[in-house]
Image (spheres, helix red, strand yellow):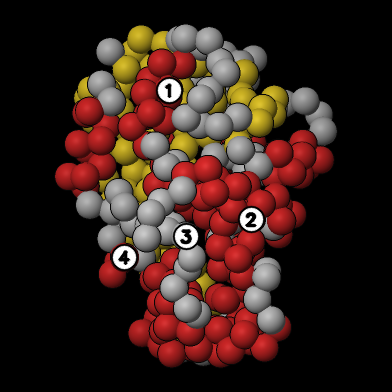
């Protein structure tokens, strides 16, 4: 099976456009992770910040609170996701720009910080995207990333994906693994190859609680991006079966009357020299 990057991007764009409002509502699940990224970025008043794979701008809004008098640009390939963000932030604290992370339209050295929360693994040409991030950073500026850890340590995503693999036929087109940068050595090598220095990596545990397997399944569908586009085309009976199967995969996360999925996320800070 060959990989078609253009098709993959179309599917991601369609998926995030489709779930834009639901994504914004469900992003509360990532509150702790967003706080960790903001802390790692060492934001200061007056800075210029670019948030890539921003979706409806949840992380960007939090960054804007830290850079009074500065500039925060929320950028994403999905224009309807950005429109949802603009609807939720009408006061003009953010700017929104639809852009492909592999072909940024910003000037060299335009930003003090580049943020990218759970997005790098979905850029088909990750080396090119990293090069673009480095290009738009000022010398001494920081790029701050989060990526899913290894699959076995990230049940928040892995449980649903295991069900999808078991129930549905193989996809007609190859998809990128959300865990492709889940090993620290792989992520560090990618950042070094892009010319970043002073790289710091640490593990953040993202803990998400759900009342039931069905609540988990709905949250996955609300945040799954490209997968959401494919799932939206399935018969309702198949979606119901997938929701029922999730209980089997989620069983190890049972705590009391509910479920807690604790997943490892790698947070990286890298400096442009």
Residues packed near mark 4 inside 10 Å, few (<14), some (14 to 19) or many (20 plus)? many
Please state the horizontal and vertical placement of residue 182, each as a whole percent of the image: 28, 53
Q: Is residue 36 visible?
A: no
Gap between marks 1 and 4 measured at Cα: 28 Å
Check contact, mark 1 vs mark 4: CB within 8 A. Answer: no
Q: Which mark is residue 151?
A: 4
Q: Which dot, 3 or 4, sits closer to the camera?
A: 3
Specify which label sits upstream in the sequence, 3 or 2.
Answer: 2
Q: Is residue 241 visible?
A: yes
Please state the horizontal and vertical placement of residue 190, each as a whole percent of the image: 25, 35
Gap between marks 1 and 3 measured at Cα: 27 Å
Gap between marks 4 and 2 measured at Cα: 22 Å
Please state the horizontal and vertical placement of residue 110, each as a whole percent of the image: 51, 11
Q: Is residue 226 above or below residue 85?
A: below
Gap between marks 1 and 2 measured at Cα: 24 Å
Residue bearing mark 1: 132
Residue bearing mark 3: 173
Check contact, mark 4 vs mark 2: CB within 8 A. Answer: no
Check contact, mark 3 vs mark 2: CB within 8 A. Answer: no
Please state the horizontal and vertical placement of residue 189, each as a whole percent of the image: 20, 36
Residue shown at the point (36%, 65%) measured from the top left? 154
Specify which label sits upstream in the sequence, 1 or 4.
Answer: 1
**Left or right of residue 227, residue 155 in this image:** left
Specify which label sits upstream in the sequence, 4 or 2.
Answer: 2
Residues packed near mark 3 inside 10 Å, few (<14), some (14 to 19) or many (20 plus)? few
Q: Is residue 72 above or below residue 179?
A: above
Q: Which quarter of the figure is the C terminus placed in?
A: top left
**Left or right of residue 162, residue 50 in this image:** right
Residue shown at the point (57%, 18%) measured from the top left? 105
**Left or right of residue 65, residue 134 in this image:** left
Q: Secondary structure at mark 4?
A: helix
Check contact, mark 3 vs mark 4: CB within 8 A. Answer: no
């Amino acid at each position: 099976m060959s990989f078609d990057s253009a098709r993959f991007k179309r599917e991601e764009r369609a998926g995030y456009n489709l779930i834009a409002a639901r994504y914004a509502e469900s992003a509360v699940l990532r509150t702790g992770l967003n706080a960790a990224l903001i802390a790692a970025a060492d934001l200061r008043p007056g800075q210029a910040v670019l948030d890539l794979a921003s979706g409806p701008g949840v992380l960007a809004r939090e960054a804007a609170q830290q850079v009074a008098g500065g500039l925060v640009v929320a950028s994403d390939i999905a224009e309807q996701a950005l429109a949802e963000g603009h609807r939720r932030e009408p006061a003009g604290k953010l700017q929104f720009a639809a852009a492909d992370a592999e072909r940024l339209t910003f000037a060299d050295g335009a930003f003090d910080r580049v943020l990218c929360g759970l997005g790098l693994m979905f850029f088909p040409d990750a080396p090119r995207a990293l090069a673009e991030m480095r290009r738009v950073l000022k010398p001494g500026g920081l790029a701050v990333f989060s990526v899913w850890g290894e699959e076995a340590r990230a049940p928040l995503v892995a449980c649903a994906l295991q069900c999808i693999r078991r129930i549905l036929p193989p996809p007609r087109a190859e998809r990128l693994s959300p865990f492709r940068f889940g090993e620290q050595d792989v992520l560090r090598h990618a950042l070094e190859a892009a010319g970043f220095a002073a790289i710091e990596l640490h593990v953040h545990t993202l803990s998400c609680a759900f009342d039931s397997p069905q609540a988990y399944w709905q949250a996955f569908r609300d945040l799954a991006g490209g997968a959401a586009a494919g799932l939206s085309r399935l018969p309702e009976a198949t979606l119901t079966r997938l929701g029922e199967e999730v209980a089997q995969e989620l069983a190890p996360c049972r705590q009391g009357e509910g479920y807690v999925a604790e997943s490892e996320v790698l947070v990286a800070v890298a400096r442009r020299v």
